């Protein structure tokens, strides 16, 4: 029997100081339209992939919500199977929450975006529009754009000529970047919309840079100004920090760490707080670049580059009111990220003194590689399903083929005549597609993993003839078999994807940017 929590009880929990996680298991489109403030989004299909990092302590209190409680109850069963011991479901879901007149909000990563707008209002972070940028360029002024997003986002599309300097790297690299520029060069920080350019500009503004702006509305603002973006940019190389650059960054970090009351951890203190993970939630976050992290990190630390850790704080610290520890190679990037968390309102925030280098110098071993692992329950699911090769599936032709991955993956290409049933909705929708439990079913996805989990679920539901396409559409394409593209047979608009930045249409971009800027209005009134 699933434990239930009332809307009133949840409201009290949200207003208190006890550690707990509120997890919304709906699709991102549903969450974006309306959700409970303080809820972190982990769609049901991602629970087995993300929970052990999102909620690392199995005894943490977890509240699961959706629209009406049905998917949340199934998600609670999954979490219990994963070993979590204190799981409850919001009684009546969002529907009951709204009926009882509790607050809702829309958007994703709202706490971080709200923080960015607050920084804009409180510190007067200077901005420059795309039109002004181009006018200055035409007038012969020298300008350089630093793109503070992830390298992957940058390569998909960026302002022409921009160079990639992800947010957490700005303070560490800016001294050497600026020294290589003419003294009168204007530095402009950009992102996809507003938050990361505002926060990145604020970091450098606080560091003492003066000839500095954020690109107002980022790549979205660039497109709205009638300009084209550059695709496939390769200006990714970050300058190795010089002795001067390191000194400037570490000095700045020490200052903001003291001003924002970031707690410092030496190696003894780090070991002590790591031991607390047996009895409470403690987040251990390495904010360096991917290559640095994979080259050697302190065991137990998960990788979340600093700029993204600030941009997605509700994904990093899913459990409210618990310690967050940041680490880098020395101290600068960890301390600056920690200082931003302190400014966001997090209480118990730490930076590791000396970082991974100090850990190694103290005689401890570093781990290499990434922290990725197969989803929970995958090995058991693999034993419970039969695998078929692309050639076997293609030759039989008597199987109903289901595609359980994202709608955008289905649209890119699926086995001809396959039906799309997203795994998060599988139990509620399978009867409408295949009611006969004696039917022959083959489950597919992009790479075989989601399909394997879905195949095991179908077997539990009583379907007797279930197989899984081994390695999914990746193997199907490699076998050069026919592929059908588009959302064929999909009657309802998918809710599992959300367009962002310049990928939105113009009206959506304008509405989104107005919403984001409006988050800061309440700070003007203080």
Image: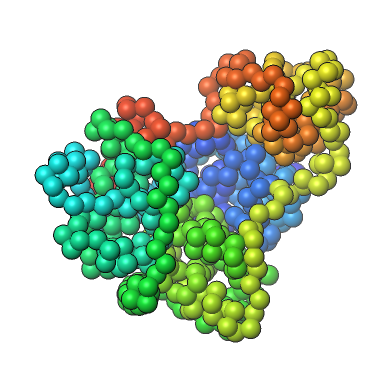
Give the residue drawn at x 86%, y 42%: 383
Relative depth, front residue between 466 and 67: 466
Q: Quick one: quadrant of the N terminus?
A: top right
Is residue 173 visible in the rendered image? The answer is: yes
Give the residue drawn at x 39%, y 31%: 504
Tally of numbered discs: 0
Q: Is residue 5 above or below residue 317?
A: above
Q: Quadrant of residue 249?
A: bottom left
Q: Could you tell whether 20 is left or right of 257 in the image?
A: right
The image shows residue 284 at horizontal and vertical percentages of 56, 66
Q: Is residue 448 above or below residue 147?
A: above
Relative depth, front residue between 20 and 190: 190
The image shows residue 525 at horizontal and vertical percentages of 20, 51
Q: Quadrant of residue 233?
A: top left
The image shows residue 193 at horizontal and vertical percentages of 34, 43
Q: Quadrant of residue 496?
A: top right
The image shows residue 415 at horizontal and vertical percentages of 70, 21
Q: Is residue 55 above or below residue 172?
A: above
Give the residue drawn at x 60%, y 68%: 296
The colour scheme used to paint the residues is rainbow
Is residue 460 visible in the rendered image? The answer is: no
Q: Quick one: quadrant of the C terminus?
A: bottom left
């Amino acid at each position: 029997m699933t434990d239930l929590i009332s809307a009133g009880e949840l409201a009290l929990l949200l207003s208190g100081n006890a550690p707990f996680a509120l997890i919304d298991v709906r699709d991102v489109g549903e969450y974006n339209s309306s959700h409970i403030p303080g809820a972190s989004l982990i769609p049901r299909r991602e629970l087995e992939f993300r929970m052990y990092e999102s909620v690392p302590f199995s005894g943490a209190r977890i509240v699961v919500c959706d629209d009406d409680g049905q998917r949340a109850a199934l998600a609670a069963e999954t979490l219990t199977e994963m070993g979590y011991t204190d799981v409850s479901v919001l009684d009546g879901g969002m529907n009951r929450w709204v009926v009882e007149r509790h607050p809702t909000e829309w958007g994703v990563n709202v706490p971080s975006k709200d923080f960015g707008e607050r920084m804009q209002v409180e510190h007067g972070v200077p901005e420059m529009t795309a039109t002004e940028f181009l006018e200055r360029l035409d007038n012969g002024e020298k300008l350089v754009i630093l793109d503070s997003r992830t390298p992957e986002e940058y390569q998909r599309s960026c302002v022409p000529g921009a160079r990639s300097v992800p947010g957490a790297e700005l303070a560490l690299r800016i001294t050497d970047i600026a020294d290589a520029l003419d003294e009168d060069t204007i530095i402009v920080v950009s992102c996809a919309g507003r938050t990361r350019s505002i926060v990145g500009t604020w970091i450098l503004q606080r560091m003492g840079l003066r000839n500095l702006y954020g690109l107002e509305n980022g790549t979205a603002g660039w497109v709205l100004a009638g300009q084209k973006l550059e695709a496939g940019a390769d200006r990714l190389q970050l300058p190795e920090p010089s002795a001067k650059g390191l000194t400037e960054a570490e000095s700045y970090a020490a200052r903001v760490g003291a001003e924002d009351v970031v707690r410092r951890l030496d190696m003894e203190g780090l070991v002590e707080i790591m031991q607390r993970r047996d009895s409470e939630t403690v987040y251990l976050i390495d904010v360096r670049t991917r290559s640095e992290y994979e080259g050697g990190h302190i065991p137990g630390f998960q990788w979340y580059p600093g700029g993204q850790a600030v941009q997605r704080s509700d994904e990093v610290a899913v459990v409210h009111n618990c310690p967050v520890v940041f680490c880098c190679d020395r101290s600068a990037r960890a301390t600056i990220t920690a200082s931003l968390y302190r400014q966001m309102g997090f209480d118990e925030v730490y930076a590791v003194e000396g970082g991974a280098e100090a850990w190694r110098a103290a005689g401890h071993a570093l781990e290499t590689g990434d922290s990725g692992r197969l989803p929970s329950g995958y090995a058991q699911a693999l034993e419970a399903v039969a695998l078929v090769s692309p050639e076997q599936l293609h030759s039989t032709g008597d199987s109903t083929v289901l595609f359980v991955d994202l709608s955008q993956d289905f649209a890119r290409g699926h086995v001809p005549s396959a039906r799309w049933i997203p795994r998060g909705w599988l139990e509620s929708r399978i009867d409408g597609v295949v009611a006969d439990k004696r039917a022959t079913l083959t489950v597919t996805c992009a790479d075989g993993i989601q399909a394997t989990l879905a195949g095991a679920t179908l077997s539990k539901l009583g379907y007797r003839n279930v197989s899984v396409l081994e390695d999914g559409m990746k193997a199907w394409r490699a076998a050069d078999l026919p592929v059908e593209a588009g959302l064929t047979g999909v009657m309802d608009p998918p809710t599992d994807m959300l367009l962002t930045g310049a990928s939105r249409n113009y009206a959506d971009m304008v509405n989104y940017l107005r919403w984001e800027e409006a988050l800061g209005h309440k700070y003007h009134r203080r």
